[in-house]
Image (cartoon, rainbow, N blue to C red):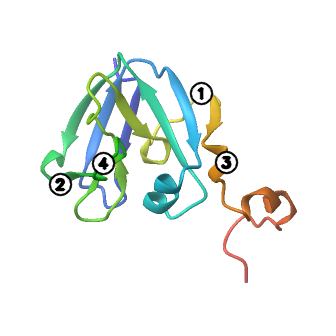
Amino acid sequence: MTDHCGSCLCGTVRFEVHGAFDSFYLCHCQHCQKDTGSAHAANLFSRSAKLVWQSGADAVTTFTLPGTRHNKSFCKLCGSALPNTQITGLLVVPAGCLDTEISVLPTAHIFSSSKATWEGKLGEVPKFEGLPD
């Protein structure tokens, strides 16, 4: 049984996740801001789910920030964030790389003391259904 399917932006890498996620964190640390280019990373974590690469496993590479436990797996061709198993016994799946819906809400915001200064004002920013004219 496949619980979740996902892929990279260019479609080279495809994967399945079998099993449940234990937690879903929005991380605001400076490392996550740098590697996502955004205000936070949105990652799902599981100690029991299994990752199965369907295609493109040879296009997956991982970067570990020296002196830290911070690491990121991504597609060598398009740069999309992909699941990571670098921490023994832990599967980390970037929420945005999933092609199936996530039925759980985030568990928590973490490292909120490092939040981007502009993030607190996002409720005041106009919203558009698509690219504005």
Q: Is residue 97 left or right of residue 82?
A: right
Q: Earlier in the sequence, mark 1 or mark 2?
A: 2
Q: Label 2: state its secondary structure.
A: helix
Q: Amino acid at mark 1?
A: Ser
Q: Nearer the viewer, residue 107 or 55?
A: 107
**Number of other residues with Cα within 10 Å of mark 3, as a class: few under 14, some 14 to 19, many 20 or more:** few
Please report the residue visible at 79 percent of the width from the left and 56 percent of the height from the top: 120
Q: Amino acid at mark 2?
A: Ala
Q: Label 4: state its secondary structure.
A: loop
Q: Label 3: state its secondary structure.
A: helix
* Residue pointed to by mark 4: 67
* Real-space CA distance between mark 2 and mark 4, rounded to the nearest whole angstrom: 25 Å
* Residue pointed to by mark 1: 103
* Real-space CA distance between mark 4 and mark 1, rounded to the nearest whole angstrom: 35 Å
Q: Earlier in the sequence, mark 3 or mark 1?
A: 1
* Real-space CA distance between mark 3 and mark 4, rounded to the nearest whole angstrom: 21 Å
* Residue pointed to by mark 2: 59
**Number of other residues with Cα within 10 Å of mark 4, as a class: few under 14, some 14 to 19, many 20 or more:** few
Q: Which mark is residue 113?
A: 3
Q: Nearer the viewer, residue 117 or 9?
A: 117
Give x and y (percent) for residue 14: 27, 44
* Real-space CA distance between mark 3 and mark 1, rounded to the nearest whole angstrom: 27 Å
> Is residue 50 positioned above or below 24 on the image?
above
